[in-house]
Image: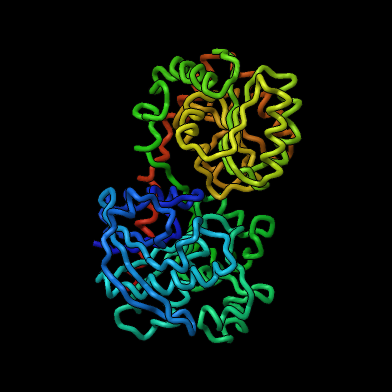
């Protein structure tokens, strides 16, 4: 049985700040179903809920070096949903109140990367493949190749590095190469870790890992071009033969309108429109909107940051709400300027708009279940899971044709009556508004609406297909190494 160590800086349900947490929480479960001996390793943050941390078993006390620093290393173990999780413990680094955003993040995640390799003898698990995720884990490939190359126990381990969002790369001052990473300056001089007079953790992962993946086929192509490449496009083009795009899945146990305990009225494909109406009325009541069974709800559930298309929404919302019979519901947190603008929008249209700028998982499920349309006008979108959840819940997506949105939302074709959503090709506010108005024009045709919803609800966005593609990569590396 192939042995896999899955390494991430976050994983649901323990800790989640974005899509990586969903992936790391869901993919290992499916890999186990496909006969992979998978274990997951994470930092032990103090924000992990007590319902999990209290059940962890302490299995090791020791220390490791972070350059010239000797630091405590503890290991906690927990079995959850049949998967063994290990948690790297060091209160100085991880008792912080949140996962990221500290001045010493370089040192924190250098420690984590060194710890992952150091604990293998302790947990007595020698993986065939280590699967790394984003910049926080990128140095594992670097340390494995540079520090363990002559170690018989380590030298046959292969690595897969997944890019979840190329924009976030882990860029730090150059002096940290020796002072924190403990590596010779030659790895700066030869360009392996150098990035415009700084060091780049993700660049190390891209160069030193055996295989690269990212979270959709379209994004894999896009990031090899300068516009989306975040100055890594040259490296990615040079490694295009080892770069694979695999669309993320969603957890079909958590996101299931038939069994979802968060929503008011569970439903299936046969009664979706009737039950959506019931969910709509109760959500309108909860949010203080006028109760209207026929008014379509347009939803937006996301981080409020520039990349999610905030500038486009801000240009069109007043016109849309002034002239169209719709209600707009937003749930998300993010940049203060966007939060304030949308609260202002609610003040201007109190009977048409509901804005919630806190994280509320229950409300998110209820919005998916009640909404008619789901907006994702992202400037770029490596994969996105919101559109897949929306399709699962019969909420028709309206999206920018980019990255994973292009791979999962099929444009409605009025001649063939095919497709599962509405798509605009150019990142342009007028094109977004036109797409919304086109979707609203079709809303009154119940037969058509049922067909589009059915196309979305019957699509398979579970992890099964995606996991099979990862397994093929692991197996190819294992065979290559045998």
Nearest the viewer among 172 and 404 is 172
Residue shown at 74% from the left, 21% from the top:
322
- 139 is higher (above) or lower (below) than 299: below
Nearest the viewer among 306 and 203 is 306
- 165 is higher (above) or lower (below) than 290: below
Regarding residue 204, the answer to whether it shows in the image is: yes
Q: How many labels does the image show?
A: 0
Query: What colour-coding does the image apply?
Result: rainbow
In this picture, residue 286 sits left or right of residue 29: right
In this picture, residue 449 sits left or right of residue 325: left
Image coordinates of residue 80 in percent, x first then y, are 28, 51
Nearest the viewer among 108 and 4 is 108
- 10 is higher (above) or lower (below) than 364: below
Residue 115 found in image quarter: bottom left
Residue shown at 30% from the left, 54% from the top:
54
Image coordinates of residue 259 in percent, x first then y, are 34, 29
């Amino acid at each position: 049985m192939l042995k896999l160590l899955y390494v991430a800086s976050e994983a649901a349900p323990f800790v989640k700040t974005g899509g990586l947490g969903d992936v790391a929480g869901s993919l290992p479960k499916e890999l186990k179903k496909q006969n992979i001996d998978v274990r997951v390793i994470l930092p032990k943050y103090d924000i992990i809920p007590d319902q999990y941390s209290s059940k962890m078993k302490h299995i090791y006390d020791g220390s490791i070096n972070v350059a010239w620093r000797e630091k405590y290393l503890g290991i906690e173990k927990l079995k959850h949903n049949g998967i063994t999780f290990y948690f790297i413990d060091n209160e100085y680094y991880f008792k912080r109140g949140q996962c990221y955003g500290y001045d010493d993040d370089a040192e924190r995640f250098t420690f984590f990367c060194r710890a992952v390799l150091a604990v293998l003898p302790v947990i007595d698990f020698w993986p065939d493949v280590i699967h790394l995720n984003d910049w926080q884990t990128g140095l594992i490939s670097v340390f494995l190749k540079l520090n363990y190359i002559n170690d018989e126990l380590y030298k046959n381990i292969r690595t897969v590095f997944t890019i979840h969002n190329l924009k976030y790369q882990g860029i730090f001052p150059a002096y940290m190469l020796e002072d924190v990473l403990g590596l010779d300056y030659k790895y700066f001089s030869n360009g392996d870790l150098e990035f415009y007079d700084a060091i780049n953790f993700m660049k190390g992962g891209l160069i030193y890992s055996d295989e690269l993946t990212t979270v959709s086929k379209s994004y894999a192509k896009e990031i090899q071009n300068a516009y989306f490449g975040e100055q890594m496009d040259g490296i990615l083009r040079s490694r295009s033969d080892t770069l694979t795009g695999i669309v993320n899945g969603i957890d079909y146990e958590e996101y299931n309108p038939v069994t979802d305990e968060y929503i008011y009225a569970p439903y299936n494909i046969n009664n979706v429109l009737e039950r959506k109406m019931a969910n709509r009325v109760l959500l309108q009541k909860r949010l203080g909107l006028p109760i209207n069974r026929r008014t379509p709800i347009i939803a937006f559930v996301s981080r409020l940051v520039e990349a999610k298309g905030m500038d486009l929404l801000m240009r069109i919302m007043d016109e849309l709400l002034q002239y169209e019979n719709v209600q707009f519901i937003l749930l998300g947190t993010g940049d203060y300027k966007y939060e304030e603008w949308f609260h202002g929008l609610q003040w201007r249209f109190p009977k048409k708009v509901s804005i919630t700028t806190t994280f509320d998982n229950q409300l998110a499920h209820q919005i998916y279940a009640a909404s008619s349309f789901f907006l994702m006008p992202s400037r770029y979108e490596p994969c996105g899971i919101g559109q897949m959840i929306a399709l699962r819940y019969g909420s028709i997506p309206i999206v920018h044709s980019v990255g994973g949105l292009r791979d999962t939302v099929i444009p409605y074709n009025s001649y063939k009556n095919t497709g599962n959503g509405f798509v605009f090709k150019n990142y342009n506010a007028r094109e977004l508004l036109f797409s919304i108005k086109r979707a609203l024009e079709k809303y009154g045709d119940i037969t058509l609406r049922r067909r589009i919803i059915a196309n979305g609800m019957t699509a398979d966005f579970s992890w099964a297909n995606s996991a099979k593609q990862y397994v093929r990569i692991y197996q190819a590396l294992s065979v290559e190494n045998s």
